[in-house]
């Protein structure tokens, strides 16, 4: 069997959820498990967390339906809300909470011939300018929704932070202030914080928080490892050295022979590539762990393999264990070398390297 796989430690995800709870004692935390739980396997992660969390969050109705079909019974917040008028009745029947960001979605709720009231979260655009109701529209929408028999009267007002991973930005404080002033007169519960808000912006903590990335053991505010609130990376992407080559100075490696040996070099080939989700743009120098030691990637990332410089590791041989990211090497650091973010690496896993669970 191919030695390339992602081990996922479900216990670590539960531990990381408790870190979020510990940092926000006055909040309830909804576990965000969209995009296949950031590549960790949505149903497995939901099963592991279900007894600890009040609710889950996904982006789309289809993801929520998939969770119900797998037997998950907690409420599920659908963060892009309804896409069709018919989604309202389906949400009401399945205890999906709809995060609504525009007038059309709220009109569907008001006019639904529903099987019962639906839970609505109102998303306000406090400055990200992506999704959300303009504050000026709120008076009218609240007047309608807060008196409608189609709406369960636990409406939550929410927003999404644009710059929370930038600890110097004044934007987060401004967004929190704007939302609080929008909600004040209606005395609604609030939801603002994502992972970065939970970790670094106490003023963003509210009745409900929405941690995602941190649950998987990664701190979105750091590109290099460090003590990040005791978070434990849940996934280790691992493989093996499958071949070794000895190069003379001037010999090139991989497509385009982009990397050229400057000294007699020992090159290891590892059985993972962009066909598995290893970032294709990772340049020479991106760290890889072989036998627990850092070595640099050299040459281009191929679909099925990468090459690393093992010249400093005299004893390295085929069959040696490799970690691409995980506890020993933060996915944030690999992402930063590749010009992306850990979120993208995790969400882009292709499934060719299987997920193997340990509790
Ligand atoms: C994805 C998402 C989150 C979670 O963000 P993290 O940075 O992963 O914690 C929270 N809220 C909304 C609206 C999202 O789309």
Image (cartoon, rainbow, N blue to C red):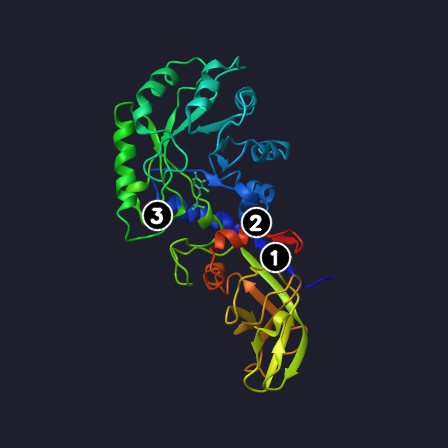
Q: Is residue 92 above or below residue 16?
A: above
Residue 253 in which image quadrant: bottom right
**Quick one: label 3, few (<14), some, or many (20+) residues within 10 Å?**
many
Q: Is residue 20 placed above or below 336 in the rendered structure?
A: above
Q: Which mark is residue 6?
A: 1
Real-space Cα distance between discs 3 and 2? Answer: 22 Å
Cα–Cα span, label 1 and label 3: 29 Å
Identify residue for label 2.
Answer: 39
Query: What number of labels is visible?
Result: 3
> Of helix, strand and loop, which one carries label 1?
strand
Q: Nearer the viewer, residue 293 or 163?
A: 163
Measured from the top left, where is residue 341 in percent x and y? 46, 55
Q: Residues within 10 Å of mark 1 (few under 14, many from 20)?
A: many
On the image, numbered disc 3 is attached to which residue?
164
Residue 21 in sight in this render: yes
Most foreground residue, 27 or 353: 353
Horizontally, is 353 left or right of 209 in the view? right
The residue under the point 29% across, 28% down is: 183
Disc 1 and disc 2: Cα gap in Å? 10 Å
Residue 12: in sight, yes or no? no
Q: Earlier in the sequence, mark 1 or mark 3?
A: 1
Q: Would residue 196 appear left or right of 168 to someone viewing this image?
A: right
Q: Secondary structure at mark 2?
A: helix
Q: Residue at 32% of width from left, 50% of height from top? A: 200
**Label 2: few (<14), some (14–19) or many (≥20) C-alpha neighbours in 10 Å:** many
Ligand 1 within 8 Å, label 3 CB: yes
């Amino acid at each position: 069997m191919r030695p390339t796989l992602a081990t996922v430690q479900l216990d670590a995800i539960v531990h990381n959820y408790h870190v979020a709870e510990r940092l926000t004692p006055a909040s309830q935390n909804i576990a965000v498990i969209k995009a296949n739980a950031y590549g960790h396997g949505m149903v497995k992660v939901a099963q592991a967390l279900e007894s600890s969390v009040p609710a889950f969050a996904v982006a789309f109705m289809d993801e929520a339906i998939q969770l119900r079909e797998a037997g998950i019974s907690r409420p599920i917040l659908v963060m892009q809300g309804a896409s069709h008028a018919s989604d309202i009745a389906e949400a009401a029947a399945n205890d999906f909470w709809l995060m609504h960001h525009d007038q059309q979605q709220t009109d569907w709720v008001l006019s639904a011939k529903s099987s019962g009231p639906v839970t609505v979260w109102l998303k306000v655009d406090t400055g990200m300018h992506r999704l959300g109701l303009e504050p000026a529209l709120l008076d009218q929408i609240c007047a309608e929704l807060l008196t409608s028999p189609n709406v369960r009267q636990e409406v939550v007002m929410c927003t999404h932070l644009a710059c929370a991973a930038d600890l110097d930005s004044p934007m987060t404080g401004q967004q929190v202030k704007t939302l609080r002033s929008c909600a004040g007169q209606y005395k609604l519960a609030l939801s603002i914080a994502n992972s970065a808000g939970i970790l670094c912006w106490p003023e963003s903590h509210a009745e409900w928080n929405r941690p995602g990335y941190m649950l998987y053991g990664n701190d979105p505010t750091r590109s290099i490892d460090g003590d990040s609130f005791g978070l434990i990376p849940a996934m280790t992407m691992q493989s093996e050295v499958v071949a070794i080559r000895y190069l003379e100075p001037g010999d090139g490696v991989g497509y385009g022979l982009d990397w050229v040996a400057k000294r007699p070099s020992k090159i290891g080939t590892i059985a993972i590539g962009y066909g598995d989700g290893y970032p294709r743009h990772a340049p020479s120098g991106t760290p890889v762990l072989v036998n627990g030691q850092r070595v640099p990637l050299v040459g281009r990332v191929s679909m099925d393999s990468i090459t690393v410089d093992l010249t400093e590791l005299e004893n390295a041989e085929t069959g040696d264990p490799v970690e691409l990211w995980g506890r020993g090497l933060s996915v944030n650091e690999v992402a930063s070398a590749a010009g992306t973010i850990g979120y993208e690496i995790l969400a882009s896993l292709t499934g060719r390297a299987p997920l193997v669970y340990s509790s």
